[in-house]
Image (cartoon, rainbow, N blue to C red):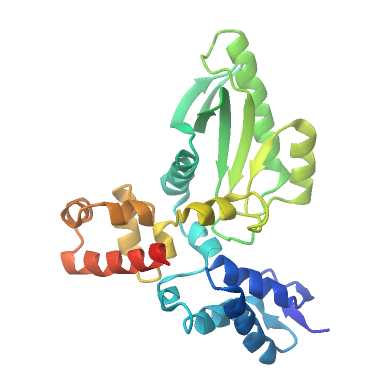
Amino acid sequence: MIFVTKFDGSEQPFDKQKIVRTCLRMHASPDQAQAVANKIEKKLYDGMPTKEIMRMIFSYLKEYRPEVKHEIDLRESISLLRPKPDFEHFIALLLSEYGYEVETNQIVMGKCVEHEIDIIARKDNSTIYIEIKHHFQSHTYTGVGILLEAKATFDDLKEGYLLRKNNYNFSRAMVVCNTKISDHGKRYADCSGIDYLGWKSPEEKGIESMILEKKFYPITFLKTLKRGELERLGNADILTLKQLVEMDVDKIRKKTGMSKSRILLILRAAREVLQA
């Protein structure tokens, strides 16, 4: 049995089907995904870093999907978003794509203290208090602490509503994060009735599957964008490739100060990714 080395230094047995699933997520056909997995398997060695395997996936997929040259790993791209306000706003936009009405950055009084609420989402007569957690390290687990905080905040908000200290009759609380949630955190959340939305495989409901279903990629998904350009776009509240391609070039230039020629190159890459 051959082992590969994960980002955190731990080892796990090589699973060829993980490569196939990754390729399928990147819009390769089943035959193409299998071909890429076969090529990587031939070059496999004991202890190979999973980061190197990901690099090889991108390299081999270019043969079948030339537009992949514009992309980075989706999980990594989410971690590159600035926590505030970019990741919070990105999640608000993503929820809007799924029919939620959203409010962001609201101060709401509970029974005991006021709370800064990241997102309030409404859908189907349900009002949800959402706590956002972002990690720069995409392989960091979101632990039980954030779920405990969400539960305490939710209870204080509910009691505040009953005492008429606020006008939000929250029916649910949810934690949304860009990483996997620890088993300890899941156990507490399931027991206490706190919903959670984190990084899961496309077969499960998580932000990855939601993004892929709508092709709702963040601007950080584009390999061609430089750090300064990402900041300019973020400051202009342009956080997704869909926003980017739907905007007029002159409007982007006015909002960001970027040159027209550079914007056209970025738009071309964004359209190739979205049309794949």
Q: Position of residue 158 (x, y in %)?
A: 63, 18
Q: Position of residue 54 (x, y in %)?
A: 58, 76
Quarter of the picture containing the C terminus is: bottom left
Q: Is residue 160 above or below residue 264?
A: above
Quadrant of the rendered structure where residue 258 is?
bottom left
In this view of the protein, can residue 236 be seen by the observer?
yes
Question: Looking at the image, how many numbered discs can be counted on the residues?
Answer: 0
> Residue at (79%, 47%) from the top-left corner?
184
Q: Is residue 239 left or right of residue 46?
A: left
Residue most extreme to the bottom: 42
In this view of the protein, can residue 5 be seen by the observer?
no
Q: Is residue 127 above or below residue 96?
A: above
Q: Position of residue 147 (x, y in %)?
A: 69, 38
Quadrant of the rendered structure where residue 69 is?
bottom left
Quarter of the picture containing the N terminus is: bottom right
Q: Position of residue 255 (x, y in %)?
A: 21, 51
> Residue at (37%, 57%) from the top-left corner?
241
Q: Is residue 219 left or right of residue 37?
A: left
Residue most extreme to the right: 1
Viewer-proximal residue, 71 or 173?
71
> Residue at (55%, 8%) from the top-left corner?
164
Residue most extreme to the top: 163
Q: Is residue 164 above or below residue 108?
A: above
